[in-house]
């Protein structure tokens, strides 16, 4: 039986050679940013149970890990601090203390690997006894009172040599506030990647385990975005860009591909997406049960984020992906 058609799309899918030529989306290690967790101490490499194959590192072991990742072509990292309970307080004062180990890690990493791009996390939650990203008074996360704290944290990180500041707190006005504070201190070359459209998501669970940073009361819905909203993301993006963000981020990634696409269409500022802990752990759990193929699911997930319009992807898959395509 032959049905008469002049257009047959399957002709361009007939073998790998032709498929690879008409492939519309490329994803290389160049696009990846690898999140790493650091802890104060020596010889530490503790696996995070809800985030398989991810560890809390002490600086000595972290240096070995980064060396290995560099050989795989991964040269961009975001660092998160695991802070001892005794160092947490209402004002997150340890975040900018002179003896903060996280600042020491930034200094040492940039000294050892000047060629890498190192990104920080700016928010109060890892340092806060309330476990919130902002300053809490009478159960309320106060916006404007949080800004000077975030800005002191940012300046301390800039001083330590961070390349990109990553405000993940979702307070209003923080990008402009931090930008002016950095400029006033002479850090006009320190970039800001703003967590622009950060949603109040269930997919941050494993990350909060990793840092032991879950909110001690309430949730984050008064500052993180409502998953039901889309137009609001363009408002957030417009403000962050006006306030001086160099790169805007959408987070999480896979449930929010429409948001990545929308911002990509509407703005010319580079866009990243955070493929968060829950998205990663979900694939691991299913693969472990034999319900799907780990590598295939990983590639499909990362490609979809890139196809939606992300220039860069923060992902726990970075190392596995780099190994796979090597
Ligand atoms: C907090 C922060 C979170 C993540 C990055 N920075 C968690 C939260 O907002 O509660 C989540 C990252 C992930 O889940 O991988 N400032």
Image (cartoon, helix red, strand yellow):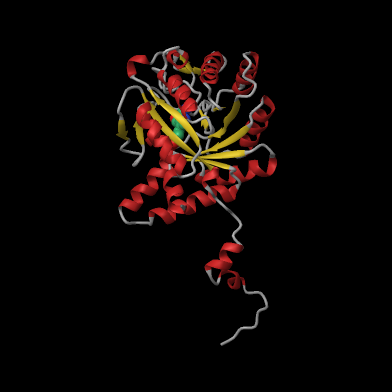
Q: Nearer the viewer, residue 209 or 20?
A: 20
Count the numbered circles shown: 0
The percent position of residue 149, horizontal first and vertical second, equals 52, 14
The quadrant holding residue 312 is top right
- Residue at the image point whose x is 64% and y is 31% from the top: 246
The percent position of residue 81, horizontal first and vertical second, equals 41, 25
Q: Is residue 91 above or below residue 34?
A: above
- Residue at the image point whose x is 48% and y is 25% from the top: 111
- Residue at the image point whose x is 60% and y is 24% from the top: 190
The percent position of residue 181, horizontal first and vertical second, equals 62, 15
The percent position of residue 258, horizontal first and vertical second, equals 59, 46
Residue at the farthest bottom position? 1
Q: Can residue 319 be seen in the rendering of this structure?
A: yes
Q: Is residue 274 above or below residue 218?
A: below
User: Quarter of the image containing the N terminus?
Assistant: bottom right
Q: Can residue 138 be seen in the rendering of this structure?
A: no
The quadrant holding residue 281 is top left
Task: Describe residue 224's horizontal placement relative to residue 44 as left or right.
Answer: right
Q: Is residue 17 above or below residue 159?
A: below
Task: Describe residue 314's horizontal placement relative to residue 44 as left or right.
Answer: right
Q: Nearer the viewer, residue 4 or 151?
A: 151
**Quarter of image, ligand 1:** top left
């Amino acid at each position: 039986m032959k049905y008469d058609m002049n257009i047959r799309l399957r002709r361009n899918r007939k073998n790998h050679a032709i498929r690879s030529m008409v492939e519309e989306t490329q994803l290389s290690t160049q696009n990846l940013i690898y999140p790493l967790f650091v802890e104060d101490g020596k010889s530490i490499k503790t696996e995070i149970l809800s985030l398989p194959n991810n560890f809390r590192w002490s600086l000595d072991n972290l240096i070995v890990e980064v060396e290995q990742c560099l050989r795989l072509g991964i040269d961009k990292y975001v660092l998160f601090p695991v802070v001892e309970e005794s160092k947490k307080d209402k004002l997150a004062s340890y975040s900018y203390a002179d003896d903060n180990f996280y600042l020491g890690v930034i200094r040492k990493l940039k000294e050892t690997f000047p060629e890498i791009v190192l990104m920080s996390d700016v928010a109060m939650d890892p340092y806060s006894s309330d476990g919130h990203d902002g300053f809490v008074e009478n159960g309320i996360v106060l916006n404007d009172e949080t800004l000077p704290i975030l800005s002191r944290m940012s300046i301390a990180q800039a001083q330590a040599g961070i390349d990109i500041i990553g405000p993940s707190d979702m307070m209003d006005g923080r990008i402009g506030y931090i930008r002016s504070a950095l400029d006033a201190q002479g850090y006009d070359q320190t970039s800001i990647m703003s967590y622009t459209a950060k949603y109040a998501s269930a997919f941050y669970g494993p990350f909060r385990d990793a840092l032991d940073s879950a909110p001690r009361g309430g949730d984050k819905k008064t500052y993180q975005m409502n998953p039901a909203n889309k137009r609001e993301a363009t408002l957030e993006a417009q403000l962050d860009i006006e306030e001086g963000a160099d790169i805007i981020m959408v987070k999480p990634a896979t449930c929010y591909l429409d948001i990545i696409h929308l911002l990509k269409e509407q703005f010319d500022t580079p866009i990243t997406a955070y493929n968060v802990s829950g998205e990663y752990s979900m694939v691991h759990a299913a693969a472990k049960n034999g319900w799907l193929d780990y590598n295939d699911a990983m590639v499909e997930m990362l490609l979809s984020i890139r196809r939606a319009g992300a220039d860069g992807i923060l992902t726990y898959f970075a190392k596995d992906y780099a190994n796979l395509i090597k």
